[in-house]
Image (cartoon, helix red, strand yellow):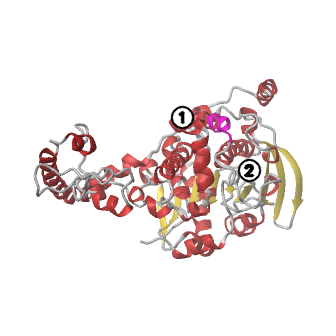
Amino acid sequence: MPPSKLDSLYRRMLITRFFEKGWGKPENLRRVFQFRKIISNRESCFKLVPRDYPVEITKKEIYSESTLVEGKFITPLELHLPGVVPKASKHAHFQLLIPNKWKSEKHKPVCIHLAGTGDHFFWRRRNFIAKPLLKDANIGSIILENPFYGVRKPDDQTRSNLHNVSDIFVMGGCLILECLVLLHWCERNGFGPLGVTGLSMGGHMASLAATNWPKPLVLVPCLSWSTASAVFTTGVMSQSINWDMLETQYFSDGQFRERLSKMVTIIDDAFSAGQSFIKNFNQSLHELKEDISDTRKIQELKNNTCGDKYEMQANCSQNDSSIFLSQSLKNTKVDTDNLTLKLKDDMAPKVAIETEPPSPKASTSTLTNLMKFILPLSAQNKSDKIDITKTNWWEREALQFMRGMMDECTHLKNFSVPFDTSLIIAVCAKDDAYVPREGCSSLEDIWPGAEVRYLDAGHVSAYVLHQKLFRSCIIEAFDRAKKIYGNDVGENLKCDMTYQQLLQQYNKSI
């Protein structure tokens, strides 16, 4: 179905602009890319957060039916990557909402709620999700403030406008480790079963966090998908990115192009091409026969026109047998100071040597029918997302770098599979223009056993109209956990390092 027009209209109404200061410091990006390889593996990531990691309770309010607790702790990412986290975001802040009386002392379910884009402070998640869950299902909630949001927002940041691309990766790294701290803290306080959820960006962050807990964990990601790359390159959010700044910085600082671009990998290009080819194999085979026939005709034409020395230099290189050059040998001529070279065959078309790039229209006409079936739609339609009339190759390369960065740090294929995928219920919008699914790996393929449900809605309409459905999926997933697991059973993973040892290591590094 076509992307939601409401999503596009809503995005245009917002004045939020992302990444106004560029990619971020190259050294910070390098450290983040290297650290991703550690936190994407459950065994190595789990050992980064000691079980005795301290959490400070700063406030406690008791109401007639519930208790609201506020707390904070130092984000573990600051201890492992000193200097990457902004000063304002170094302390994680959260609220815990639990019932005054549990239905069973052996069953105290608690779910961590992560924030979507623009969800600052606690009130929205507390009133729309946490309180109804408490009332309807006796499920407690932990509402975690995102880095760069609310009380953790840097002073020079306006609203949700992240200054650098690297900020989104720092946010993700913080939330992954902070969720481990909170899950440990919940276990120490006798809570369980445990879960994590979120909407939009919060849903994807919840998915990343859930991959590193070595025990059964409820996961309900809403309005998210397998990677953030499509969100920032083909979704409506791409319209809010300062591409001019990113392109200029990418080519002005050699570290991005020469060093950092080699540290990232685009995940879904080959995967999508293969899937599309198989899906359209019969038609592709027919197109292939036509292309082979066309190629033979082109080759014959080349053999007839390659006798002239100038023509061989211009169009008949021995290394150039591409089937995309059907137009390059027609209706062309060499024109240097009005000099025209005729071919041996008077009836043959003239050959032109042109230094200007082909027009978009010509490029489209030379794309074979076969490639239209093989290439992902995102690859065919890139010109629709970013204006490439200025410096075509510049913007394409910067765009590919963005895709590679996002896939490297956010694609679920790069992370461990959650401990029990039967406890996962993902909710997606069919017409989501914020989180495109075309050309991306599906959650069912990455996480066999996970359940994905689709809403007949766009991103914005689903967020506004289907909060009750999101809550019902959370309740259902916790009921599953209760039926399957009497007590938590997990891998025998332990963090041998205590918090004091981690602190000593941090003090030595700064």
Viewer-closest of 315 and 40: 315
Three-letter amino acid code of the residue under disc 2: Pro
Instruction: Give the residue at mark 2.
Output: 147
Local crowd size for mark 2, using a 10 Å CA cut-off: few (<14), some (14–19), many (≥20): many
Q: Name the one closer to the observer, 41 or 383.
A: 383
Q: Nearer the viewer, mark 1 or mark 2?
A: 1
Boundaries of the magenta span: 25-31
Residue 358: image quadrant is bottom left
Residue occupying image coordinates x 56% and y 76%: 6
- Residue 13 quadrant: bottom right
Q: Residues within 10 Å of mark 1 (few under 14, many from 20)?
A: few
Near-viewer residue (474 or 333): 333
Q: Is residue 357 in sight in this rendering?
A: yes
Q: Is residue 292 above or below residue 259?
A: below
* Left or right placement of residue 270 versus residue 140 in this view: left
Up-down relation of residue 80 to residue 433 (above or below): above
Q: Is residue 282 left or right of residue 172?
A: left
| Percent coordinates x, y for residue 144 in the rendering | 74, 53
Q: Quadrant of the C terminus?
A: top right
Expressed as whole percent of the image width and height from the top left, the position of residue 340 reads 24, 53
Q: Amino acid at mark 1?
A: Glu
Image position, residue 329 (x, y; %)? 22, 53
Mark 1 or 2, nearer chain start? 2
Where is mark 1, residue-wise? 258
Q: Is residue 30 magenta?
A: yes
Give the CA distance from mark 1 to mark 2: 30 Å
Q: Main secondary structure of the magenta part?
A: helix
Q: Is residue 382 left or right of residue 196?
A: left
Q: Is residue 50 among the parts visible in the rendering?
A: no
Quarter-of-image position of residue 44: top right
CB-based contact (under 8 Å), mark 1 and mark 2: no
